[in-house]
Amino acid sequence: MAKTHRLYIDGKWEDGKETMPVIDKFTGETIGLVPLADKAAVDRAIAAAHVAFPAWSRTPAHKRYQVLTKACQLLEKRQEEIAAIICREAGKAWKYSLGEVSRSIETFRFSAEEAKRIHGETVPMDASAAGEGRVGFWLRCPVGVVTAITPFNFPLNLVAHKVGPALAVGNTIVLKPASTTPLTAIKLAEILEEAGVPAGVFNVVVGSGGTVGEWLTVDPRISKISFTGSPPVGEAIIRKAGLKKVTMELGNNSGTIIEPDADLSAAVPRCVMSAFANSGQVCISLQRLYVHKAIAKEFTKRFVEETKKLKVGNPLEKDCDVGPMIELKEAERAEAWVKEAVKEGAKVLVGGKREGRVMQPTVLSNVRSEMKVMCQEAFAPLVSIYEYDTFENAVAMVEDSPFGLQAGVYTNDLKKAMYAVDRINVGGVMINDTSIFRVDHMPYGGNKMSGLGREGVRFACEEMTSIKMVMIKP
Ligand code: NAP
């Protein structure tokens, strides 16, 4: 019998009138039932966060640090238990599920440390004649209640990127996790409760984006919306949010360039991992691979050989590389995109087939920029190899995208590296690595359709605070 879980509101565990099954994405088995929050439950969660804010925002930094540090310790103790939940509800291969838990511990640790670094600055008031004789400084203040809306693909670490900074700066939170992966978020609530987060400071409500997500977007008691997900949903939220602070972490069709001087023994396995980890369902997954014509044949041969070695199937098996996709309709869409590309002239070098939710890692060549597999976000285990002639053309093609999250360039030529940094309008350019590189304290986020604002703990803390200027006339 699958366990029935509860919502976490105002420090209490609540049942709901209706429940929703959460399934193992590989076997289809029901692994848990979660209550769906109705309007009254969402209202209670917002009210609780609102009431808890004054006390939590005045809780000294060293105490917020202690609570977050305790959360790290508890996560550390329960790594395998949490990885198993991620593995089953998200269909993420075991090694990547375990990797996500250890990254989340680091994200919470960075957040604990950041709690002690919420600095302001003095202002040299006498730089203006009108400011003579006055003292000025600004403070960073928590904004209030934060709505956190998160996607399925990193059900713990992308939650940690919102919850850690919010708690660090003294905000309170209502979290709505993705409907396909709510169990990890509920587990996190247990951990934060045990870590000593006071009642009302952190709340989890489960339900669809169109209901719970929308209620959490429009409520006037919410001061800030931190959203990670797809660009259309991000845009819809911004339109309804009104005058609230927003951070939007959205999608990408990430490109990486391979110059002839690249060390292929390092680049090939790294590119394969970057394309297929988490079945390509990573916002910075390698989707467009631009390889110089001088090495294209050799690179492609080695890339295909390496792709064939991947173990595809049950994510719970310790050596699995590629598990199922999140939903059948997403796997069907990926397969249809491949078929459409082939119809338009693309060649499948490996993969292209699907069984249920499991899409084989697929490598395409003979692609053109207008094909869906190139110009839209695939969010699937699909990568296209494009042979280019000049570096400038390759840079222009990577830049020719409505998205702007991250890009990669393999080159040892500093001038070329800096040319790419200058010309590609993205939040991050990774030299001698692919678009997928991320550590959790670096600034991370997109330009163009990839989003607004930055995460990465220190940067999320800045986005979750507002500046208050103080002037003193002695
Ligand atoms: P999604 O469909 O946009 O859903 C994300 C979250 O938004 C879910 O919790 C969803 O709830 C909720 N939602 C849906 N409609 C809503 C509405 N009208 N109002 C408020 N909330 C709403 O995205 P996804 O399929 O889970 O994730 C994939 C996307 O996320 C990709 O585009 C990927 O690139 C992007 N992503 C970006 C980053 C980054 O850091 N830039 C990281 C990871 C993923 P339901 O689950 O109930 O629909």
Image: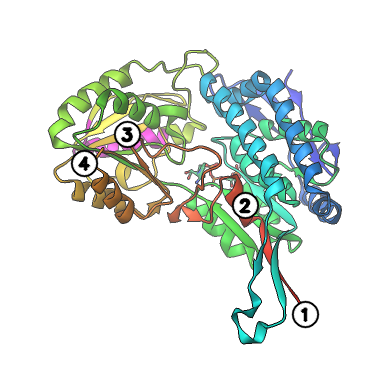
Where is residue 309 shown, x and y percent of the image? Answer: 34, 15
- Disc nearest the viewer among 2 and 3: 2
Quick one: label 1 or label 2, which is nearer the N terminus?
2
Quarter the C terminus occupies = bottom right
Quick one: label 4 or label 1, which is nearer the N terminus?
4
Where is residue 388 shown, x and y percent of the image? Answer: 17, 42
Q: Give the amino acid at mark 2.
A: Ser
In the image, the segment drawn in magenta is 332-347
Q: Give the amino acid at mark 3.
A: Val
| Contact? badges 2 and 3 (CB < 8 Å) | no
Distance CA(mark 2)–CA(mark 4): 39 Å
* Secondary element at tag 2: strand
365 lies left or right of 75: left
Distance CA(mark 3)–CA(mark 4): 16 Å
Where is residue 446 shown, x and y percent of the image? Answer: 46, 52
Distance CA(mark 1)–CA(mark 2): 38 Å
Q: Residue at x 15, y 28 (%)?
A: 297
Q: Is residue 427 above or below residue 129?
A: above
The numbered disc on residue 226 is 2
242 lies left or right of 94: right
Pointer 2 local density, CA inside 10 Å: few below 14, some 14–19, many at least 20: many
* Secondary element at tag 3: strand
Quick one: label 3 or label 4, which is nearer the N terminus?
4
The numbered disc on residue 344 is 4
Which residue position is annotated with label 3?
Answer: 383
Report the front residue among 113 and 20: 113
Q: Give the amino acid at mark 1.
A: Lys
